[in-house]
Image (cartoon, rainbow, N blue to C red):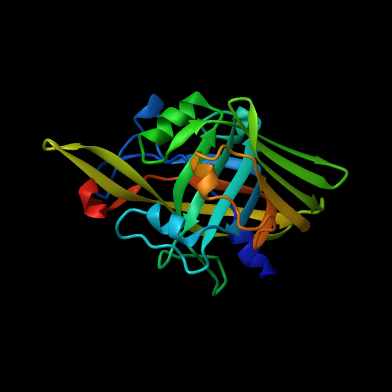
Amino acid sequence: MRRSAKLCVALLFAALVLSPLGSLYSPNKAEAGELPAPQLVTDAWMFMAAYKADPETLKALLPPGLEPNPAGHIVINMYTVPTATQTSGFGAYTLTYLTVELKDQDSYVLGSDTTIPGRYFVQYFNSSPTMREYTKKIGIPAQEGMTTTTVKDGKLTAVLTVGGKPLIEATADVGSELGNFGGGHLNYFGLITSEKDGKTMSQVVKYPIPWVGGTVEMKNPKIKFNVPEDHLLNKIKPLSETPDWAIWTKGSFVYPQYVVVSEFTPDAKN
């Protein structure tokens, strides 16, 4: 399914390791590694796509106050940052994450009437121990995983490997000329659970991500899952190997402070 060039560019970025707040709406330094916020990542090549998944599963994965977008999408991003100098502090890493596309949480594309649905993190596989520790503290469900992306003879292959086993493979035919440059903002969301006054409390947090970048031509994208039946990835696998949209992009983005948007006790979800 084709969309405008600016929309396609917008649908990419955010690798997303974001820094915590000391109190509601009040920015503070990151606890992990004492890295200050914000942090910058530049020139990352990313395979990003949206595919339809089971709508009841998507609804069940969200905390109170967030609803699935009617399109019923999971948005997946698979990418690598091969050199430490592409970042302002995180160093080299690889990442695959999956998010539920949200209703009524849109962000903007510069110079366009297009808006992009927000996204809630449900899976996040990072190769860097430092980044896994950092992201867990700020509401992102980080776990270990290695992502590779290769382009050979115009064929892109992106693979997520966890525990020595390839779980997700994406392929596409891609061009080499970068264009369709743009910028804007994306709204990502996570969940922090902690003890407060002797009670377990959960906070829905928002990560507003600024980005700039471009895309190359892409054809014939496919996404395949090879996961155990009891793995969460199996519950959010694509209903079809062909995604509704996909892009191969090169972009830069900032990891900002998060903002707490709501609080609740875990029982409130039931």
x and y percent of residue 260 in the render? 29, 50
Instruction: Tell me the residue at 71%/56% (across/down).
Output: 215
The number of numbered discs placed on residues in the rendered structure image is: 0
> Residue pushed farthest front?
229
From where the camera sits, is residue 182 visible? no
Residue most extreme to the right: 153
Depth check: 233 or 25 in front? 233
**Given the current orientation, which residue lies at the most extreme left position?**
197
Which quadrant holds residue 167? top right
Q: How far across and down, in percent of the image, does residue 8 sit?
A: 64, 62
Residue drawn 64% across the image and 42% down it:
44
> Does residue 141 appear anywhere in the picture?
yes
Quarter of image, res 169: top right
Question: Looking at the picture, how far across and down is residue 52, in whole percent?
Answer: 57, 60
Quadrant position of the N terminus in the picture? bottom right
Query: In the shown orientation, is residue 154 left or right of residue 192?
Result: right
Residue placed most toward the observer, 6 or 237: 237
Q: Is residue 203 left or right of residue 3?
A: left
Location of residue 118 in the rendering, given as x and y in whole percent from the top left corner = 46, 59
Q: Residue at x 51, y 63 (%)?
A: 72
Side of 185 where 152 appears, left or right: right
Residue shown at 51% from the left, 48% from the top? 235
